[in-house]
Image (spheres, rainbow, N blue to C red):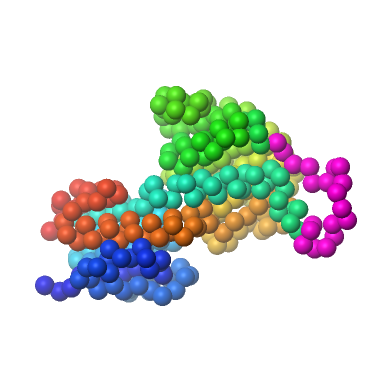
């Protein structure tokens, strides 16, 4: 029987690959940090037993047909998997795994860092000092928004949304949340209150997005939604870029009908709407929500463990479609 081959589309933390290194597996990792183009993706994955992908790698019917019948698992190096056609993978008997839990705290930290950075105008303050233009303390210089005691609206109360809510409690914030379903348990645990989206947007001083990307959430925050928000409010997005209509957001920020925004994700990464880069009331980060050494290493380990389990015919806890393993030839 030929040695199993695993193709990894980008360089990952080496420590996280230990589960694969300890097995009799041929590990073919692309030594590059940029997204792989489609032709190279199909060529590299062809004939593989497993592929570890990133969000920029589209796994669909043409991919599955091109890779071939040996493929048993696609492990996505992310919590989200909107780049993967889960139904098509299941039809082909290909398991799909993601990397939940291990990046929750890091991403929640990033959301709060952006919230605080925008509220206290950290970017503008840094630029003022670093440019040599600062002439000293002034009573009206770079006045920001209060975070302590403010109202935070969380859209999407999953793992990361809950972690953000826990941080908000430390600042004495009132927390509203909107989810597909009301969650009495999270209300009891974290003292949150459920609200429909329009009411949440209207009442919140800060809104943090943590919903998954789906047809129902594409441009969830559009011009109409932004018009519901207070002109003194701040929007934070560490979820998925297409949840926000970037053109509408840039317009609201430019007209100052929205006070500020902090963005870690964008509609068409790595491109960013030009209107956003020209503004001083927005903080932009290069999709670094999970960018801590421990989180990124743990993500690689989860993906690796899922691959090892699937190649042995077992389903790890982060397999999204375990029925695919049962139906595999």
Image quarter for residue 66? bottom left
The stretch of residues the image draws in magenta is 128-146
Q: Position of residue 166 (x, y in %)?
A: 51, 36
Q: Residue at x 48, y 70 (%)?
A: 34
Q: Main secondary structure of the magenta part?
A: loop
- Residue 192 visible (yes or no): yes
Q: Position of residue 149 (x, y in %)?
A: 65, 30
Which quadrant is the C terminus positioned in? bottom left
Residue 319 among those drawn in magenta:
no
Instruction: Tell me: 215 left or right of 129.
Output: left
Image: 243 above or below 50: above
Q: Nearer the viewer, residue 18 or 319?
A: 18
- Residue 260 visible (yes or no): no
Image quarter for residue 305? bottom left
Q: Position of residue 133 (x, y in %)?
A: 85, 60
Which quadrant is the N terminus positioned in? bottom left
Residue 133 among those drawn in magenta:
yes
Q: Residue at x 40, y 50 (%)?
A: 102
Q: Residue at x 46, y 42 (%)?
A: 160
Q: Position of residue 317 (x, y in %)?
A: 27, 48
């Amino acid at each position: 029987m030929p040695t199993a081959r695993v193709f990894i589309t980008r360089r990952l933390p080496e420590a996280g690959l230990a589960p694969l290194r300890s097995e009799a597996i041929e590990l073919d990792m692309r030594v590059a940090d940029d997204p792989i183009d489609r032709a190279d993706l199909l060529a590299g994955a062809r004939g593989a037993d497993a592929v570890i992908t990133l969000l920029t790698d589209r796994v669909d019917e043409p991919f599955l047909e091109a890779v071939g019948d040996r493929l048993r698992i696609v492990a996505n190096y992310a919590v989200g998997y909107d780049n993967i056609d889960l139904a098509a993978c299941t039809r082909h008997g290909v398991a799909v795994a993601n990397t939940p839990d291990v990046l929750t705290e890091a991403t929640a930290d990033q959301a709060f860092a952006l919230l605080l950075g925008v509220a206290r105008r950290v970017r503008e303050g840094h630029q003022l000092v670093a440019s040599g233009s600062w002439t000293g303390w002034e009573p009206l210089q770079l006045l920001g928004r209060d975070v302590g005691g403010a109202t935070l609206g969380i859209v999407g109360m999953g793992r990361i949304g809950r972690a953000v809510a826990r941080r908000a409690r430390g600042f004495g914030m009132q927390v509203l949340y909107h989810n597909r379903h009301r969650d009495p348990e999270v209300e009891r645990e974290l003292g949150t209150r459920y609200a429909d989206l329009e009411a949440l947007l209207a009442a919140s001083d800060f809104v943090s997005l943590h919903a998954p990307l789906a047809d129902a959430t594409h441009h969830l925050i559009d011009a109409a939604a932004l018009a519901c928000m207070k002109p003194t409010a701040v929007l934070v997005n560490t979820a998925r870029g297409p949840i926000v209509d970037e053109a509408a957001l840039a317009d609201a920020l430019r007209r100052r009908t929205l006070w500020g925004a902090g963005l870690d994700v964008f509609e068409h990464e790595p491109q960013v709407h030009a209107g956003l880069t020209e503004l001083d009331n927005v903080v932009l980060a290069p999709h670094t929500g999970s960018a801590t050494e421990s989180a990124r290493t743990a993500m690689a380990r989860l993906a690796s463990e899922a691959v090892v389990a699937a190649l042995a015919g077992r389903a790890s806890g982060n397999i999204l479609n375990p029925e695919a393993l049962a139906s595999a030839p």
